[in-house]
Amino acid sequence: MDKEKRANIENTLPEKVRFHPLSEFEEALTGLASPVRVDARALPYAVALCLKGAGVHIETADNPISLPKACKNPIEIAQARISHGRDGSVMCEFLAWLDAQPLGDLSEIDVAIALEGFRRKNPELLDLSFDTISASGPNAALPHYRVTRQSNRLLQTGEVMLVDSGGQYLDGTTDITRTVALGAQSKEVCDAFTRVLKGMIAISCLKFPKGTKGQEMDSHARAALWAAGQDFGHGTGHGVGQFLSVHEGPQRISRADGPAFQVGMMVSNEPGFYKEGSFGIRTENLLLVQEASFDHTDQFLEFETLTYVPIDTRMIVKNLLTPSEIVWINHYHELCLQRHKDNVSPQTAAWLQEVTKPI
């Protein structure tokens, strides 16, 4: 860290915060007075050994910074809405472009490069929030796939294309996954796509008592898949930072324990299904925790959807949906159209008009 940057940071922090050169890290640790409080879930083993070797008594506790940082303030929330709106328009341009591409010569790397190009047209973009997951066919069955020159493959008719991506804008961090049909799909794929979508909708619509943890919500995202003897091996959602890490705890929606959800927390909502060697499906929006809209109680919370990008209705099996789920999808798509039609090219606006028609 250069001297000017360090001086700026030092001037904004209390005098109790002391700075040391990185070369003196171990020496500074061994000079600490007991007890030293650490978050055991994030403590590097080498640091623990250093403290113990110096005879420093260690106490474990939750990081006191994590929870306040996870609860976004009104300015951060307002900026998050703006950045997600901008990124939603980018994604519409990209998906319209992808739908118009002839298959045969288009590769996973081509898709990732194209999406990055759409995002970089925005001067507010600092960088991608993570390496884009651009996965087609059997590669989409790998939840955390990263395309390389060796694994890169051409998109083929009859497969699905899974794209998980995000941007680090000066006013917020985004993370979105859409699965796109490359031509007609099998009943197996469409059924799985619809069950994943049902799980995503279930979390989006959830109203829950204050004090509820993500561990208690997780099964709502899996119920439709479980009914068909299916599941997915990753968590349903992770916390998201505000112009910070796209994976930011401590909140999460998963089988693992975590803190109770609070107003202002952002979390991803990304159920999926993966058939090894064949295909993968994931649909992801980001959500914001807010007070529930009940007149008779203030003890419940709900989610506000931040991500508005069309979902590929070509793979929806309508008779697997409830009437309320159909209403949700149609309303969601109406909002997608209204939010983006004036912020995209005429060609993309025409595409939006088509893909957001009621099912």
Image (spheres, rainbow, N blue to C red):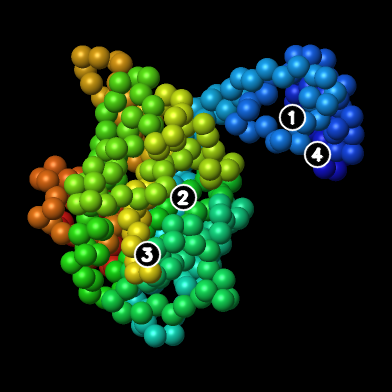
Q: Residue at x 47, y 78 (%)?
A: 153
Residue 122, percent from left and from top: 54, 58
Disc with the residue nearer the chain's start (3 vs 2): 2
The mark found on residue 5 in the picture is: 4
Which three-letter amino acid code belongs to the residue tagged 3? Glu
- Horizontally, residue 224 falls left or right of residue 145, namely left
Q: Residue at x 12, y 46 (%)?
A: 322
Q: Which residue is mark 3?
A: 276
The crowding category of the residue bearing disc 4, from other C-alpha atoms within 10 Å (few below 14, some 14 to 19, many at least 20), is few
The crowding category of the residue bearing disc 1, from other C-alpha atoms within 10 Å (few below 14, some 14 to 19, many at least 20), is some
- Point out the frontmost of discs 3 and 2: 3
Disc 1 to disc 3, how far (Cα)?
Answer: 40 Å
Q: Which residue is mark 1?
A: 48
Which three-letter amino acid code belongs to the residue tagged 4? Lys
Disc with the residue nearer the chain's start (3 vs 4): 4
Residue 229, percent from left and from top: 23, 51
The mark found on residue 175 in the picture is: 2
Which three-letter amino acid code belongs to the residue tagged 1? Ala
Residue 106: name its quadrant: bottom left
Residue 314, percent from left and from top: 21, 65
